[in-house]
Image: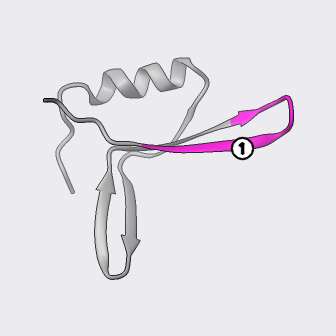
Amino acid sequence: MPAKDLFHDTVKNALVKEGWIITDDPLFLQYGGFDSYIDLGAEQIVAANKAEQKIAVEITRN
């Protein structure tokens, strides 16, 4: 499992403040025998039409 970078908690807190629910920390993906970790998985329910939005967030520092 990858280490959290310097901005991980800042980005996570900003998403929560904007109404996102953190579902995975980290998000584990497996595709075609390839395993990968994305920093965060989150979802947000849009009340107007009851639709659900999902995102995966990869935090990098250049």
Quadrant location of the N terminus in the rendered image? bottom left
Taking 42 as reference, is 27 above or below it?
below
Residue extent of the magenta highlight:
45-56
Quadrant where the image shows the C terminus = top left
Residue at the extreme bottom: 33
Q: Position of residue 41 (x, y in %)?
A: 46, 46
Kindly identify the amino acid type of the residue bearing the numbered disc 1: Glu
The residue depicted at 52 percent of the width and 24 percent of the height is 16
Density class for disc 1 (Cα within 10 Å; few <14, some 14-19, many ≥20) is: few
Q: Main secondary structure of the magenta part?
A: strand
Splitting the image into 4 quarters, where does residue 50 fall? Answer: top right
31 or 4: which is nearer to us? 31
Question: In the drawing, does residue 17 fall left or right of residue 36?
Answer: right
Q: In the rendered view, would you say 40 is above or below 6?
A: below
Please tell me whether residue 61 is drawn above or below residue 24 in the rendered image: above
Question: At x 53% / y 17%, what residue is drawn?
Answer: 17
Front one among 27 and 48: 48
Q: Is residue 58 above or below residue 27?
A: above
The location of residue 32, given as percent across then percent down, is 37, 81
Q: Could you tell me how many numbered marks the image carries? A: 1
Q: Position of residue 19 (x, y in %)?
A: 61, 24
Image quadrant where residue 34 sits: bottom left
| Residue 42 sits inside the magenta stretch | no
**Residue 45, located in which quarter of the rendered image?**
top right
Magenta residue check for 50: yes
Residue 12 x/y as whole percent:
40, 28
Q: Secondary structure at mark 1?
A: strand
**Residue highlighted by disc 1:** 52
